[in-house]
Image (cartoon, grey):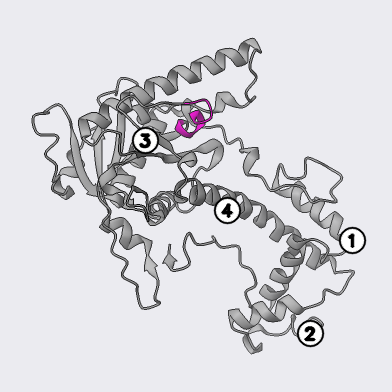
Amino acid sequence: MSLPNNQNEDRSTIFRRSDGDAQEYWSQVITPEPISEELRELIREDLQKAWHWERLESFRFRIKYNWGIPVDSQFVLLNDENGTVTRDQLLLFCNKMTAFYWLQTGQLVNAFGERNHMPRVVFATIYREWAQYFDSQPNIEFGHYIANPIRITSNGPSTIPGVLKAHYSLCMQACDLMAKLRQENELGSNPLRTDLWRYNIHPLYKAIMLLIDRFEIDFQSDADNLFRLEDGAQQQTVLIVRTGLEASLSAPISFDSLRAESLPLDRSDVDGHPMIDIVRTSLTTAVRFVLDLERREAIASPESVQDGALDPSLNPGPHLRAVDGRAGRDPKTWADSLIEAAEKHGYDDDHTTRVSIRRVQAAMVGENYYELTPIPFGNRWKE
């Protein structure tokens, strides 16, 4: 199948295929080579966009599977009121704004009658609210995210005071372990990683925590037979707790702005604990509240904000035929290396350039082919 000869015609007169038909059509198109310089530059531009898209998808993949797969090795488990932070888990605490504790009462029952399942839909709603807050351009570098999940086991604390005690312990362990690793790195006795200085326990992490004590999302589909994650974020409630560890913040945390929209606590374990400051809100409100605090702290301490460096672990790898091993470090070099290889071996030789040239050609006639849009967290969920 050859390329269409109508790419220079008035687009208003061109017949446009449906997305499904366009996908099938462009998958069968044979790329005539050599290609024009104009098309080559459009592909170069498309590949640079694809570089950013692949980095974001790599981050989303980590969130989807590190949070959403019910495998305990992916989580920090809380088996008692002390908890344990291992070296392998340390970076999970770093560059996060808070901890997200999942009480037993909020976990679903598995096939063996055990409460150990944290529904992925909640994690998807958290990600959606976080990304929306930053206009879909959040900071994804070096593990930066709103929170890390901590699953409380059947032997772990079941009360707010118990979780609060565990939070103190986990924060102290994480800070002590980070200091120890940095010292080892400086001495050269354990060069764990050269970028360790980019990872920190954020002051907010110690000052505030989120808890889910019940699962409340009602899967009601819209007219498209899709469940809107925005609705789930409004349905799911979250407990927000001040820990009292606010000495490193620019100002104390206050829940005054949340009182008007807060919901009944429905918990008796905080009775008799007047010093525990706690509110229940929708997940949407909780996420935005934490991110407002993050923004406040960034304004107060601009030196604490990351310098714009990119996390190399998110970068797409270089083309298999690329001569320059640095090809994945920035979008231009990556795109140039892919085009260089494609010019030698053909644009259909590599999946990335094969898709890119067809995506560009399809766009030239107003059609869509493998658009650079986020891969959904769930097939029936709408972000």
| Residue tagged 1 | 345
Q: Residue furthest front?
A: 112
Q: Residue furthest left?
A: 272
Q: Is residue 16 left or right of residue 126?
A: right
Q: Dividing the image into 4 quarters, which one contains the C terminus?
A: bottom left
| Residue tagged 2 | 5
- What SS does tag 1 mark? helix
Which numbered disc flags the more N-terminal residue, 4 or 2?
Answer: 2
Q: Position of residue 142 (x, y in %)?
A: 55, 36
- What SS does tag 2 mark? loop
Which numbered disc flags the more N-terminal residue, 1 or 2?
Answer: 2
Q: Is residue 316 left or right of residue 276?
A: right
Vertical placement of residue 297 versus 11, above or below: above
Q: Is residue 169 left or right of residue 76?
A: left
Asked if labels 2 and 3 touch by Cβ distance under 8 angstroms, the answer is no
Q: Position of residue 48 (x, y in %)?
A: 69, 54
Q: Position of residue 346 (x, y in %)?
A: 87, 64
Which numbered disc flags the more N-terminal residue, 4 or 1?
Answer: 4
What type is the residue that disc 1 sits on?
A: His
Q: Position of residue 170 (x, y in %)?
A: 37, 25
| Span shown in magenta | 86-93
Q: Nearer the viewer, mark 1 or mark 2?
A: 1
